[in-house]
Image (cartoon, rainbow, N blue to C red):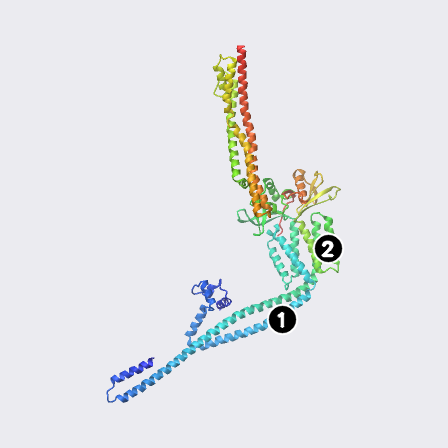
């Protein structure tokens, strides 16, 4: 019977989207066919209807009875209709009278309900974004119901409702001043749910297990921040969680979580580096090459200067090092006069100098070129930004600021490469100079010795 | 038609079978019999057709009646729902009349309780802006005694006071005043309701309200001096908000 009713409703109202299977249970029928039938103004007999007619056909003897019964049903339903209609009319009248009575009695209270509605609405809006919501989720149901109830003209809040509203506001007020521990379901950084003990500091922050949380308004749960603030802040969180007396330093976000949420949205160091794009990559590559060259030259020169200083203590046995090779020239020309020796020694030293200074100018070039490239990247980035502004206008300052800060990344990269390169260049070239100085010193000594000997 | 066939067959059979002598009489008889039979057939045929027509008519009538009944049932069902809703509505309205009586009698005592509650709360709260808050409560009491203010307006004023008090828990602010119990003039920094700090103008002395001790205590400058100074700047909107290191008391287990 009920199914028949549904069928009739579905057909009568032309509501055929989802209930098509109800209309036709025996054979599947697609929506287009059904639509066509409805368009033609033909509705299919439901299975039950068809069965009924089959039964009617089969029971010839009963036909008259069945027909009579159907007619009786019709009469009964018609009577019921009339009765209901009368009831409806009288109720309508009564309701109008009652409404009038309520309105008359309300008088001044109408204004009061207006105030209650506003207070409930404001309170609910504040609760929804409050850290305490995770602790008292059940209150939002009450607040919503109350706001709806008072919003309807014919429904009033009871004294109990007003008291409950007062209680909720009072509780929120008390909770804002509390540092409290409670256990709640926590959304972890990977999205999994797990109960955890949370320490809430007023309505400013909540921490759990040494990590900062934020209140996820959509999920209506506290969630671990996917990026935590700097270590110097994080290290203090544990102490507050375990503290039992006295005052503990706590890194508090005075903006009630906004700062921490922005932290998640700000780019990481790696993201910032990638903002430099091709120019940035080139600068960093050049920088890396420069550092490797400098280290290699430094190792070589340290070896050389060690060998030279050892040679300086042992001048009779010339070895295979710059000073050794100069000494060899001295020892090979024992009979040469002073001027000849001087020329020969100068030649030997001039041969050694380029080997010592090998690649050092490249370090200097890198130190100079890196910031220039950074500047190039910045300028091209700025040009792009201004073109964006030309296209989109300056309606959104975020767009402009973002573009400019991205453009400046290359300058930063250039400088971070250049500054250490200047230091490295100075260190390496001073090493090389020191070795050349030793060579010159020793050579002058040899010439002086020869001059004395030939006197 | 079958009757015609029968007649013609009979005729043919008669013509073939009959001997010549009795031919005329027999044929006449046969024809008469055949005709009467044919008539009977036609009559019964008519009856059958009438019966069938009556059955079809009845079936159609039955179909139509059941269709009408189904439609009526749907209509009545909806009507019944409407009437049920009306009954509910009537109950709500009668209930409202009771509620109105209730509220008229109880709203004023409730508001008095609300003010008492707020007063108690301010007493045990951190001692910030003590004068301002005491004045607000006194004003509330004054409004409650006035006859020319409507109930709604009184309720709004009470709720406004609550709103301001709740707002204290969400904001940070700074104000200048004397440190309670001394003549030292300091800048107070209120971080919601979780911390109340002070610092004198040259930053040599920094302190905080300690709930456990029930008074202001000095806190080490090494940890808090810069933080409180920054906090004061942020509260005055002279600096961009940043994480602040503030002294926090121990956590209490939540009373649920």
Chain name for mark 2: B
For disc 1, the chain is A
| Residue at point 53%, 70% (across, down) | B75
* Residue A390 versus residue B1 in the image, above or below: above
Labels 1 & 2 near each other (Cβ < 8 A): no
- Residue drawn 72% across the image and 48% down it: B129
- Residue A211 can be seen, yes or no: no
Q: Position of residue A354 (x, y in %)?
A: 50, 24
Query: On the rendered image, what quadrant is the N terminus of chain B found in?
Result: bottom left
The mark found on residue B140 in the picture is 2
Label 2 Cα neighbours within 10 Å, binned few <14 / some 14-19 / many ≥20 = some
Label 1 sits on a secondary structure element that is helix
How crowded pointer 1 is (Cα within 10 Å; few <14, some 14-19, many 20+) is rated as few
Give the residue furthest to the top: A455
**Which residue occupies the foreground of this view, B102 or A89?**
A89
- The lab-note entry on whether marks 1 and 2 share a chain reads no
Q: How many numbered marks have been drawn onto this rendered protein structure?
A: 2
Q: Position of residue B32 (x, y in %)?
A: 32, 87
Image position of A306 with respect to A175: above or below: above
Q: Any mark on residue A93, and which?
A: 1
- In the rendered image, residue A363, in percent from the top left (x then y), is placed at 53, 30
């Amino acid at each position: 019977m009920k199914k028949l009713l549904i069928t009739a409703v579905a057909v009568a109202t032309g509501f055929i989207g989802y209930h098509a299977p109800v209309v036709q249970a025996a054979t599947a029928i697609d929506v287009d066919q059904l639509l066509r039938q409805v368009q033609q103004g033909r509705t299919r007999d439901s299975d039950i209807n068809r069965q009924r007619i089959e039964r009617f056909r089969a029971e010839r003897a009963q036909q008259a009875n069945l027909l009579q019964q159907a007619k009786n049903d019709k009469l009964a339903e018609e009577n019921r209709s009339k009765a209901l209609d009368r009831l409806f009319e009288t109720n309508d009248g009564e309701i109008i009278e009652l409404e009038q009575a309520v309105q008359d009695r309300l008088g001044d209270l109408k204004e009061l309900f207006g105030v209650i509605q506003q207070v409930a609405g404001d309170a609910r809006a504040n609760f929804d974004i409050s850290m305490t919501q995770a602790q008292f989720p059940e209150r939002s149901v009450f607040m919503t119901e109350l706001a709806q109830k008072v919003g309807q003209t014919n429904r009033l809040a009871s004294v109990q409702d007003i008291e409950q509203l007062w209680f909720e506001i009072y509780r929120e007020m008390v909770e804002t001043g509390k540092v409290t521990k409670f256990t709640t379901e926590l959304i972890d950084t990977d999205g999994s749910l797990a109960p955890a003990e949370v320490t809430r500091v007023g309505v400013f922050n909540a921490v759990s297990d040494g990590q900062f949380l934020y209140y996820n308004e959509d999920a209506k749960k506290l969630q671990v921040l996917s990026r935590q603030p700097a270590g110097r802040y994080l290290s203090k969180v544990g102490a507050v969680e375990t503290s039992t007396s006295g005052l503990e330093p706590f890194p508090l976000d005075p903006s009630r979580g906004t700062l921490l949420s922005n932290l998640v949205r700000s780019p990481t160091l790696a993201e910032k580096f990638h903002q430099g794009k091709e120019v940035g990559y080139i600068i960093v590559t050049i920088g890396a090459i420069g550092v490797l060259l400098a280290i290699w030259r430094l190792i070589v020169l340290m070896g050389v200067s060690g060998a030279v200083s050892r040679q300086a203590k042992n001048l009779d046995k010339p070895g295979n090092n710059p000073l050794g090779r100069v000494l060899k020239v001295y020892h090979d020309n024992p009979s040469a006069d002073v001027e000849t020796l001087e020329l020969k020694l100068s030649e030997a030293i001039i041969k050694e100098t380029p080997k010592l200074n090998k690649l050092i100018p490249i370090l200097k070039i890198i130190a100079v070129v890196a910031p220039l490239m950074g500047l190039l990247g910045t300028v091209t980035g700025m040009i792009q930004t201004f073109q964006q502004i030309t296209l989109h206008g300056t309606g959104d300052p975020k767009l402009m600021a973002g573009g400019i800060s991205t453009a400046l990344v290359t300058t930063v990269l250039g400088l971070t490469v250049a500054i250490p390169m200047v230091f490295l260049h100075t260190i390496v070239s001073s090493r090389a100079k020191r070795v050349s100085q030793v060579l010159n010193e020793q050579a002058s000594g040899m010439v002086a010795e020869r001059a004395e000997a030939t006197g | 038609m079958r009757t015609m066939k029968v007649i013609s067959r009979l005729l043919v059979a008669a013509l073939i079978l009959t001997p010549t002598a009795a031919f005329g009489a027999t044929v006449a008889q046969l024809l008469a019999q055949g005709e009467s039979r044919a008539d009977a057939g036609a009559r019964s045929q008519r009856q059958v057709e009438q019966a069938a027509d009556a059955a079809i008519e009845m079936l159609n009538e039955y179909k139509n009646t059941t269709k009408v009944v189904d439609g009526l049932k749907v209509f009545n069902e909806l009507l019944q729902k409407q009437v049920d809703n009306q009954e509910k509505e009537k109950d709500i309205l009668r209930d409202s009349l009771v509620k109105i009586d209730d509220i008229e009698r109880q709203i004023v005592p409730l508001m008095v309780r609300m003010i008492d509650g707020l007063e108690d709360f301010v007493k045990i709260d951190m001692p910030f802006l003590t004068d301002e808050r005491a004045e607000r409560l006194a004003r509330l009491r004054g409004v409650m005694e006035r006859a020319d203010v409507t109930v709604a307006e009184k309720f709004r004023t009470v709720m406004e006071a609550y709103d301001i008090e709740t707002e204290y828990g969400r904001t940070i602010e700074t104000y200048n005043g004397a440190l309670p119990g001394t003549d030292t003039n300091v800048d107070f920094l209120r971080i919601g309701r979780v911390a109340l700090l002070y610092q004198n103008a040259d930053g040599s002395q920094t302190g905080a309200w300690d709930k456990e001790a029930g008074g202001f205590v000095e806190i080490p400058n090494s940890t808090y001096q810069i933080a409180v100074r920054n906090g004061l700047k942020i509260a005055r909107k002279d600096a961009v908000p940043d994480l602040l290191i503030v002294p926090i008391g121990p956590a209490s287990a939540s009373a649920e």
